[in-house]
Image (cartoon, rainbow, N blue to C red):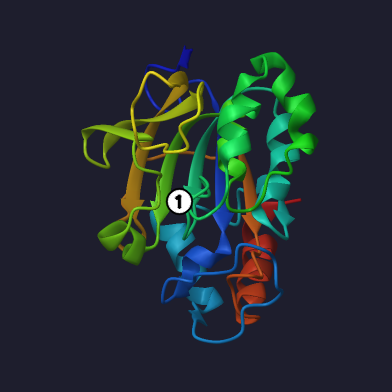
Amino acid sequence: MRVIEGSRGGNMITVLDIDIDLFVDPLPTGPLVRTGRRAEGVEAWRPEKVVDFMQTWLGLNSDRRIPGRVFETHEEILDALAELQSPVHLYHLDAHADLGIGQDCYRFYSDFLAIERSLRPSRLCEFNPRQGDFLLYAIACDFVGSIDYVTHPEVFAYCPDIPIGMDRWTDKYTDGYLDLRRFCGTSLEYSTRSTEQELDCSIPLRMFNRDEFRPPTVSFDCMFITRSPDFTPRMSDRVVDRLQNKFLDS
């Protein structure tokens, strides 16, 4: 079992991971499979409002551009995380936790976590990580060593989308851990802490409401921006373009 202790970030590379669906209201729900562009029922923030959020609460400055990339769907960042070659502290700005809620992740818990840790990155393609569960694989492969999860206010208030039994809080939402447990028997119920579940790894976790986010002073080494067309209207592409042109050194 691997447990990462100490302060969040520490000497880790700090990655600002922005899924643009965080800046869509109301909370964008989507399909379990890709269907194309989300067109109805949601409204994207104006580009100027998102830029102001980035400058005010994350300290971004167009005079200090951050190396990074733009992706279409969120699982595509796995290769980029692997290239960093060490566990990162992930500022995960997303309307969804991407920890497998609503998806069939049994093969991840029973088979992927059974693979020797050092071999997991080379076996990723066999398991086909998706935009809704890619973060499970990133943690299991040691790509991510701690997480600050900034989520949509509707998620924060009503339905934190972290699988039951995976989050372990010493101070709810402000100081806790995220545990990955491997199925060792026949139980399909992740929420049951039974002898059939073996703790694989545990990493520091904090969770923030987008509308009340007041982060500590931090500088980012890398920035990833994801379009997520299944969850965003076309207006969101303008937000991506503005962020890319203003803050990204790509």
Q: Secondary structure at mark 1?
A: loop
Q: Where does the image place residue 227, in percent across and percent down from the top left?
A: 66, 64
Judge left or right: residue 167 versus residue 85: left
- Asked if residue 215 shows in the view, the reply is no
Q: Residue furthest bottom?
A: 40
Q: Quadrant of residue 71?
A: bottom right
Residue found at x 65% / y 58%:
226
Q: Where does the image place residue 116, in percent across and percent down from the top left?
A: 67, 14
- Nearest the eye: 219 or 178: 178
Tell me if residue 60 comes above or below residue 188 in the rendering. below
Tell me if residue 60 comes above or below residue 170 in the rendering. below
- Nearest the eye: 71 or 202: 202
What residue did someone put label 1 on?
59
Q: Where does the image place residue 53, in percent across and percent down from the top left?
A: 43, 63
Q: Where does the image place residue 76, in percent across and percent down from the top left?
A: 73, 48
| Disc 1: CA contacts within 10 A as few (<14), some (14-19) or many (>=20) | some
Judge left or right: residue 24 versus residue 115: left
Residue found at x 63% / y 36%:
107
Q: Residue furthest front?
A: 186
Judge left or right: residue 85 versus residue 59: right
Q: Quadrant of residue 35?
A: bottom right
Tell me if residue 127 comes above or below residue 116 in the rendering. below
Mark 1: which amino acid? Gly
